[in-house]
Amino acid sequence: MPITGENLIGAAARRGEGESFRAVEAATGNSLEPAFASATPADVERACALAAEAFDSYRETSLEDRARFLEAVADAIVAIGDELIVRCMAESGLPRARLEGERGRTVGQLKMFAGVVRDGGFLEARIDPAQPERKPLPRPDLRLRQIAVGPVAVFGASNFPLAFSVAGGDTASALAAGCPVVAKAHPAHPGTSELVGRAVQQAVKQCGLPEGVFSLLLDAGIAVGQALVADSRIAAVGFTGSRRGGVALMQAAAARAVPVPVYAEMSSINPVVLLPAALESRGRDIGRAFVGSLTLGSGQFCTNPGLILAVDGPGLDGFVEAASAALGDIQAATMLTPGIHKAYCAGVAALEANPAVITLARGLAGGTHQGQAALFSTTADAFLADHTLAEEVFGAASLVVRCPDLATIRAVLERLEGQLTAALHLDEADHDAARALLPVLERRVGRILVNGFGTGVEVGHAMVHGGPYPATSDGRTTSVGSLAIHRFLRPVSYQDLPEALLPAALKDANPLKLWRREDGKAVAPGA
Ligand SMILES: NC(=O)C1=CN([C@@H]2O[C@H](COP(=O)(O)OP(=O)(O)OC[C@H]3O[C@@H](n4cnc5c(N)ncnc54)[C@H](O)[C@@H]3O)[C@@H](O)[C@H]2O)C=CC1
Ligand SMILES: O=C(O)CCC(=O)C(=O)O
């Protein structure tokens, strides 16, 4: 499939008339062919108009048709073949095995949402039958279902160019909910974005859906994203990226005449608590495993373990020694973009220059665009006194905070901003200590895990990949897993509608064979 550098607007491919830009080969900094042309305000207008036009018919597609569409998108992505992986490797600097795995995750995610759609449980059908004889007042017939919110703008992430990008989790969950998607390509991987965008476009056509179900817009800068979020037809926004970018989009959406929700996944340092018995029995093993998680993908994961908390003592010394030794052997790895590499170097330099911070270890030095892993330590007093030490350094850098006791670990956790994940390393003898920390962690994070690290998010039904601000803009939800569909749904009640006018999900005969809540009780189809 040739990459043309065009915007995909509904069924059309149009060369934008905005600023021209090229993808950059992450490993060398060289420009790649072809030139991409930024969309214009007229392109944004056209994509949003088509999405709005498609909305009513797309959201009422049958569950089976919508599920098949999601599967067709998955198949079309696979059908691109190796060209997708090769282009993505060049644009992102990520290795083949990682990207092949990420493609599998992307396709699996689309198929999981196909299953969610077929199941129909997301419609949350509820029926409170009329009680005409009720005294003192009769009860009306009330029925509820969830409907799609409207066209969704999706901003692809630089660090997951497939699974969190054009046809990633935000797009899959929005399409599953019944929302058309206008995607804004990340400028770091426009070629990858176009290839995937064309696969979605092809699936829309193949399934006979209205063309406005999907569009893809390009931009060298931020104007297209700003215009998209400001457009009155966009009903919600999905974003993964920097705190600055996410907050800017939240502000743009809030400033609209009709504000809309922005589901932004932003910064997180993902505290890891090493409890005393575990440290004593296997501190060195944990240290080595930690370095594996820290340096995965050059540390460019929002779930990266950026903060280690433990009580000072020989157990922690063992962890630090083993982690430092393992880190010292880590090869520097190409980072996603020169900008992200520069930001990483600046974050590491700031920690190195901080008089309260000790540099424990550095990975092997690398080339111009490669991130050199780093491990630092500080005291709990210093950490609590300097809020900059709790800021995300995006890349393979982490800070060990030596605490005098468990109460101080708790105090540090209490002071942290919202996080995506927290990990506890514990043995059975640590259960009481862990139990005391759980309420704090529940308030601070979206996912609590034991004897592991948060990198590598499982895509499933019980996953929460979210967390209180600033991990995300709205900690009540998730961007990974089937629950993500609820970001793009809204409940509607139907009072006293004649059977003929009721949506299929709520008709007496239950033609969709849904589990429904009738008078508050779960009722199986056919019961
Ligand atoms: N926590 C996380 O999951 C991630 C964090 N990052 C952080 O973000 C930094 C920059 O990485 P990027 O991926 O380029 O993130 P970014 O936030 O700068 O850009 C993400 C997307 O949002 C758009 N955007 C950014 N600011 C905008 C604005 N004011 N108005 C409209 N659109 C806007 C960009 O064009 C891009 O499409 C990294 O160095 C890292 O610190 C990046 C990726 C993931
Ligand atoms: O760890 C993962 O698998 C996903 C991480 C993530 O969501 C991100 O880095 O943006």
Image: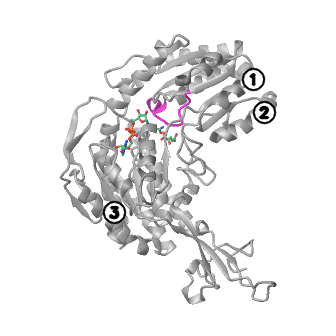
Q: Is residue 526 above or below residue 374?
A: below
Q: Mark 3 and mark 1: span between their CA atoms?
A: 53 Å
Residue located 81% across and 27% down the image: 429
Rendered image coloring scheme: one colour
Does residue 197 sit above or below 471 in this rendering?
Answer: below
Residue at the (60%, 78%) spot, across then down: 494
Q: For the residue marked with disc 3, what is the amino acid?
A: Cys
Per the picture, the main secondary structure of the magenta-coloured stretch is: loop
Q: Is residue 164 visible?
A: no
| Disc nearer the start of the sequence (3/2) | 3
Q: Nearer the viewer, mark 3 or mark 2?
A: 3
Q: Nearer the viewer, mark 3 or mark 1?
A: 3
What's the mark number on residue 436?
2
Residue beneath the point at 60% across and 51% down? 476
| Residue 394 percent coordinates (x, y) | 46, 30
Could you tell me residue 212's position as x and y percent? 34, 67
**Chain part drawn in magenta:** 296-306
In the picture, the disc for residue 48 is 3
201 on left or right of 455? left
The image quarter containing residue 409 is: top right
Q: Is residue 300 magenta?
A: yes
Which circle's residue, 3 or 1, is located before the other in the chain? 3
Q: Nearer the viewer, residue 331 or 454?
A: 454
